[in-house]
Image (tube, helix red, strand yellow):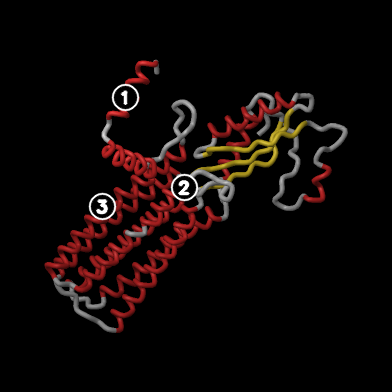
Amino acid sequence: MDGKQHAHHDHDRQERPTRTRRPRRWRHRLAHLLTPHSHEAGDKVDAAMETSREGMRTLWISLVVLGVTTVVQAVIVALSGSVALLGDTVHNAADALTAVPLGIAFLLGRRPANRRYTYGYGRAEDLAGVLIVATIAASAVLAAWTAVDRLLNPRDVTHLWAVSGAALAGFVGNEWVARFRIRTGRRIGSAALVADGLHARTDGFTSLAVLLGAGGAALGWRAADPVVGLLITLAILLVLKDAAREVYRRLMDSVDPAFVATAHAALRGVDGVLGTGQVRMRWIGHALRAEADIVVDARLTVVEAHRIAVAAEHALIHAVPRLTAATVHTDHTPVEDDPHAVLHHHTSAGRRTAPTPAPSTSN
């Protein structure tokens, strides 16, 4: 920017009325809070921020779809006066709000790391996943209790056309949301979003139970509604198992073994890497971080060894999906004195040990 442009810019700032600056400043702060951004050099896009934005977009669209579904059900409830439909509508509306803690988790995940949370706030997604699993479990308990109550205290189902319409709307809306969330969650690596999609599927099952129960009642089978409710409870328990497994594996730092194999192959393909040692990965929210040991020639200078380590990190980031950073430790080929000897009495299960050199062409 030349001097004239700078002076003109300052003049504009001085001429701008004071009352217009505050709204602009607040709009800027609000956009800064809600919009993922990156301070990386050049045009590099922060992949973790992009996936966070995609996750938030999925949650918003899902909430709109579930909101429309709930409104449709509420209209039919008002027309029919069905208490059963009212309960199902309230249930779907309340469960749709489980997207709120997940949305908060996505927002927290954007916060930068600090001295207390040195890996950032990505783990907030896992906490949201635990809450979602607990909600699915509560849904199973509620469905079972309702079904048993209907068996012990039979009641006729009235306004079957309204019941069928509301149930169909609930099933279609929840199943669409379930597929959307699960697909996005698997694409961006968010176990919590996958669990929330499975939770939406349980809501669809609940609505389907109402539809099937209405069909059975239309055929004269009074116990159809509670019997179908018990079957749906079993289906919810199966969904609960899948959701709990997703969240449990994430909490236990489980990764796909294929990622580790890919990492070893990528490291061995780097010029100057003579072998690989331990490779460890963990999910931080919907992003992966890795730690890897490589073997280099003992005659290299520190600068040369560091250059190889940087090339190894670069290769890992390109080879492993959703990997955003890696710490690469360089070991060297055997020499007279073992540099790791001082650490031997500290080494235990789970600690890093010296890697075994291997040819770069080995599998």
Q: Which callout, 3 or 1, points at the residue further toward the start of the chain?
A: 1
User: Which is more foreground, mark 1 or mark 2?
Assistant: 1
Q: Which residue is mark 3?
A: 65
Q: Is residue 61 left or right of residue 348?
A: left
Q: Is residue 225 left or right of residue 328?
A: left
Q: Which residue is mark 2?
A: 109
| Quadrant including the C terminus | top right
Question: What is the spatial separation of the Cα atoms under label 2 and label 3, in whole angstroms?
Answer: 25 Å
User: Which is more foreground, mark 3 or mark 1?
Assistant: 1
* Tags 3 and 1 touching, CB below 8 Å: no
Q: Which residue is mark 1?
A: 11
| Quadrant including the N terminus | top left
Residue flagged by tag 2: what amino acid is it? Gly
Q: Position of residue 49 (x, y in %)?
A: 44, 40
Question: What is the spatial separation of the Cα atoms under label 3 and label 1, in whole angstroms?
Answer: 49 Å
Q: Position of residue 10 (x, y in %)?
A: 35, 25
Q: Quadrant of residue 28?
A: top left
Q: Secondary structure at mark 1?
A: helix
Q: Position of residue 36 (x, y in %)?
A: 40, 40
Q: Secondary structure at mark 3?
A: helix
Q: Which callout, 2 or 3, points at the residue further toward the start of the chain?
A: 3
Q: Nearer the viewer, residue 168 or 38?
A: 38
User: Which is more foreground, mark 2 or mark 3?
Assistant: 2
Q: Residue at x 31, y 80 (%)?
A: 149
